Image (tube, rainbow, N blue to C red):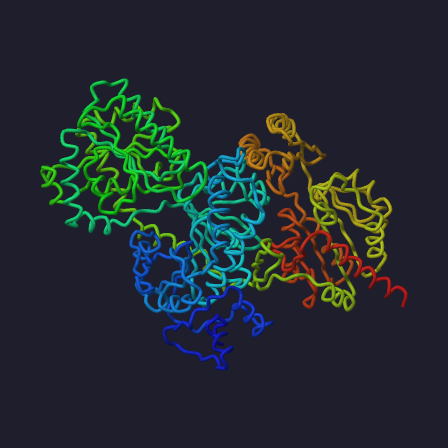
Amino acid sequence: MASRSYSNLLDLASGGSPTISREKKRFPRVATVPGVLSELDNEIGNGADSDAPSSVLQERLIIVGNQLPIKAQQNSDGKWNFSWDNNSLLVQLKDGVREDVEVIYIGCLKAEIEPIDQDDVAQRLLENFKCVPAYVPPDLFAKYYHGFCKQSLWPLFHYMLPIVPDYGIKFDRSLWQAYVSVNKIFADKVMEVISPDDDYVWVHDYHLMVLPTFLRKRFNRVKLGYFLHSPFPSSEVFRALPVRIEILRALLNSDLIGFHIFDYARHFLSCCTRMLGLSYQSKRGTLGLEYYGRVVSIKIMAVGIHIGQLQSVLNLPETQSMVAQLRDQFQGRQVMLGVDDMDVFKGISLKLLAMEQLLTQHPNKRGRVVLVQIANPARSRGRNIQCVQSETFAAVKKINDMFGRPGYEPVVLVYKPLKFFERIAYYVIAECCLVTALRDGMNLIPYEYVTCRQSTQMLDEILGLNPSTAKKSMLVVSEFMGCSPSLSGAVRVNPWSIDSVTEAMEYTLTASEAEKQLRHERHYRFVSTHDVAYWARSFLQDLESACADHTRKKCWGIGFGLGFRVIALDPSFRKLSVEHIVSAYKRTKSRAILVDYDGTMVEAGSIDSKPSRQTIETLNSLCRDPKNIVFLVSGEDRTTLTEWFSDCDGLGLAAEHGYFIRPNQEAEWERTISVPNFEWKQIAEPVVREYKRMTDGSGIESRESTLVWDYRFADPDLGPSQAKELMKHLTGLLAKDGVSIKNSRQTVEVRPKGVNKGLVAERLLAAMQERGETVDFVLCIGDDSSDEEMFEVITAGKDGHSLSDAAEIFACTVGQKPTSATFYLDDSFDIPKIFHALASSSNQDSAS
């Protein structure tokens, strides 16, 4: 079957028929009107499988970023010239992609193209650069980029809430709608070129955080990776965003989510726990979130730099000339270098205060030390940028007025766009690099500096250095930057502490040559081996692993808008339909029905767990049918169950997860296993009470056979952490007391070994077999891990001959999750429908 990619749909739209070819894929002319292709697809392919097998052999990677890695220049005659932007990360990461993988880029151009030229430009970019431009109307782009991205997301992700008007703006739904609209335009561009079963998609950064939802909605099995290049804030900050749930759910539609450092990943996972109720786990070193049957993997690896590109620039004649010029300019002085964007988060003014303090406290440094501060033009707009500029200029003037003299300026402010080789030249001559941002996602300036300090033979000759001498460098970095953890030899500082930064400056200037060489060697070894190619290769390997089981699972989507998500289940795991079970129920003669109560018959966490009158009537209808034996299994104590179900004469009850059992109301409660004593409770109860005291929101339930610590209402992070500690504590104390300790459904439960709900199923099937009844229908419903033993017993019933060979077995769990059951229901509200249908069938049989 031909791939249902947009290229085939365009062929169909033009009157042609799809051709199945094993050759390299050729793209059609790229459409420039957002939305048209989606409408065309819906019109032509209504009802068809969106994940049809593709005919494309060559593996492809579609890289999606806010901007294409393309430089655009318009000639005087109006013609456009394009070239690669080799400084773009999206170009550099291609070195980590296998040569046999075709790379397609999707993003905005850095130039505004007139509508009349857009088709022609799109075709040229596709043919010459394999780039697909996303054209966004200027007014929409302003709301999307300068509005929501730079004034809402960027400050928030850097821990700045819009409390005062000068910093960020209040949430504006029109800007959010613009953000979503632009993400949809990007999604349409991806859909134009993707072959969903063959291609991998890699989305970059916070500009496109909801794009995964649009792609997953169109192609349920799309192979999708996402990498965030900015910090991810703590849950206390992120929860201030009104659209927090929409963004989290959108990111979870990826297969792999990447972060620079563990702190960012930890904050994201904490948000998923606190706001979506999800839990994560580590398996063989890989962090993952279970999300509707899909495992969303978490990747933690900092991006690197392109070593080859830097080395080639170091060898340029222009670089060598610039180095010679700077050598003469700063002859006899120690140069400290700062390279930052003119941004409120870069901490330039604090760095200048530290420089002022250094010269005040160490008069011997005056005339000998120079701070060169390169201030790159700001990427965003707003009053806060103007404030930063004014503050920076004022601080520089103050320091130079105080400590400057003819021929000496202690601070040299370079506030103009520098060519790459010019910046490289400053790296080469600087003895120390100061990067003291208040908050930064990664910041590759220290990596670039270390690489340039490795220098070349020609540059060593220009600087009068012996090429055989070990290289040296010193770094002062903020502890709030993503690059900080990987630079083990750097002097880490709190940029808010002027004293700390001043001391670090003084230390780097006076450190011994041997120490400078040792620190440089340690840094260069890491930077040179963890370059951008290494990062890209590692991410793509993990993405391939994360998507490995796509074809094995059955997928379908649920939810509307940005609440859309995909359910991925084993093909044999299917939803229990009323028609299916009623049909089997009618044609069978000996039926066993086992149903868990807590979380199944009543919703988990309900304040009032007492059964309703309707539930009692339904159970009675089933119990009155002579073909049925019905058992209700619960963790509640027998006194409570006796009271709740006193009106159900024929109902079998199992209390405390099967420790007590009663086949009907007339029978006495009996124990399923013999327990010699419960002395362990005297040891365990004081410990559990201490954990209750130390964990606000937790509680204790003590039953005849069981001790339960419940942390459902505790803090979402503290509760699970305390539960793990309690498990370890009790395991050590009760190792020889014949008990099992389990942590499930936000409780830690201690009970005698061998007590489980599987005992109830075994007892029931054995009792029916003793009476000579061959069971030909079994319905077993549960909702959590404590019910798995019941599922295992009934599914193995045919092998043990307790069920007939033709028995209809319905092991059903509530919710889509890994389980031993073969059927599922969406939630506990579906169960009354099933029981009502079965009871109606029994009533019809009785009447007839």
- Residue at x-position 20% and y-position 51%: 312
- The image quarter in which residue 695 lies: top right
**Is residue 763 found left or right of 429 in the rendered image?**
right
Question: Looking at the image, is 396 positioned above or below residue 528?
Answer: above
At 17% across and 48% down in the image, what residue appears? Answer: 318
Q: Nearer the viewer, residue 688 or 88?
A: 88
Residue placed most toward the observer, 626 or 363: 363
Residue 603: percent from left, percent from top:
71, 46
User: Can residue 266 be seen at all in this image of the molecule?
Assistant: no
Of residues 395 and 430, which is closer to you in this image? 395
Position of 406 compared to 138: left or right? left
Q: Position of residue 532 (x, y in %)?
A: 31, 50
Going by the image, does 521 lie left or right of 649?
left
Horizontal and vertical percent position of residue 188: 49, 63
Horizontally, residue 18 falls left or right of residue 93, namely right
Residue 45 in the image: above or below residue 718: below
Farthest-out residue, bottom: 16
Give the x, y percent position of residue 347. Answer: 37, 32
Asked where in the image residue 198 lies, by quadrant, the reply is: bottom left
Residue, far front: 76
Picture quarter with the C terminus: bottom right
Whether residue 757 appears in this view of the structure is yes
Q: Is residue 35 above or below residue 322?
A: below
